[in-house]
Image (cartoon, rainbow, N blue to C red):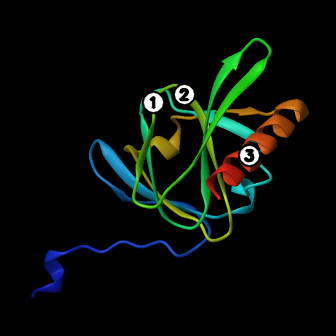
Amino acid sequence: MNPSLIEVYTHSGEGYNPFFIKDTWQVAQLNYMPEQDISGIEKMDKHGQTDEVFILLRGTAVLIAAKEQTTGFIFQCIDMKPGVTYNIPVNMWHNIAMKRDAEVIIVERSNTHLGDFVYKPLSPQEKSELSKQIQDTLNQSM
């Protein structure tokens, strides 16, 4: 078989790497990095022009979605399962909490990482609530 017929992409380093970008969509890999630590989520983000698809390859990760209210964020957390496709709709606040062994594939509109994002820091109360929900989510899965 001619190896040039098949393109192969991998990301073994820390953090986010959009390694395959086409005209209207891109594939990236997010590996553990301290900002995504399971006990240290500091902010939420959202995209105004794209849904964002997450697929856990391996490890432990909790996908977080949030609705913003006048009193702060209301969180929903899910313990990601390998091989399952999860979608965060456009304009939905979200983040992902990861343990060191986590690797996640992300599919979204092309060049999202270059500017289609808004970040919002969490208040101390929101951080505390989110941390509790992440731990509860992981404990329910055991």
Residue at mark 3 to residue at mark 1: CA–CA distance: 24 Å
For disc 2, the neighbor class at 10 Å (few under 14, some 14 to 19, many from 20) is: some
Question: On the picture, is 4 further left or further right than 44?
Answer: left
Q: Amino acid at mark 3?
A: Asp
Element type where label 3 sits in the image: helix
Q: Residue at x 73, y 39 (%)?
A: 43
Q: Nearer the viewer, residue 33 or 99?
A: 99
Counting residues from the N terminus, which is met first, the one under dot 3 or under dot 1? 1
Element type where label 2 sits in the image: loop
Can you say whether 98 is above or below 65 in the image?
below
Element type where label 1 sits in the image: loop
- Where residue 107 sits in the image (x, y, percent)? 39, 49
The residue pinned by badge 1 equals 89
Residue at mark 3 to residue at mark 2: CA–CA distance: 22 Å
Q: Residue at x 74, y 40 (%)?
A: 133
Can you say whether 12 is above or below 62 in the image?
below
Quarter of the N terminus within the rendering: bottom left
Quarter of the C terminus within the rendering: bottom right
Q: Amino acid at mark 2?
A: Met
**Labels 1 and 2 touching (C-beta < 8 A):** yes
Q: Residue furthest right?
A: 124
- Where residue 59 sits in the image (x, y, percent)? 57, 67
- Where residue 92 sits in the image (x, y, percent)? 54, 27
**Labels 3 and 2 touching (C-beta < 8 A):** no
Q: Residue at x 80, y 42 (%)?
A: 132
The residue pinned by badge 2 equals 92
| Residue 59 image label | none
The residue pinned by badge 3 equals 136
Can you say whether 131 is above or below 28 in the image?
above
Q: Nearer the viewer, mark 3 or mark 2?
A: 3
For disc 3, the neighbor class at 10 Å (few under 14, some 14 to 19, many from 20) is: few
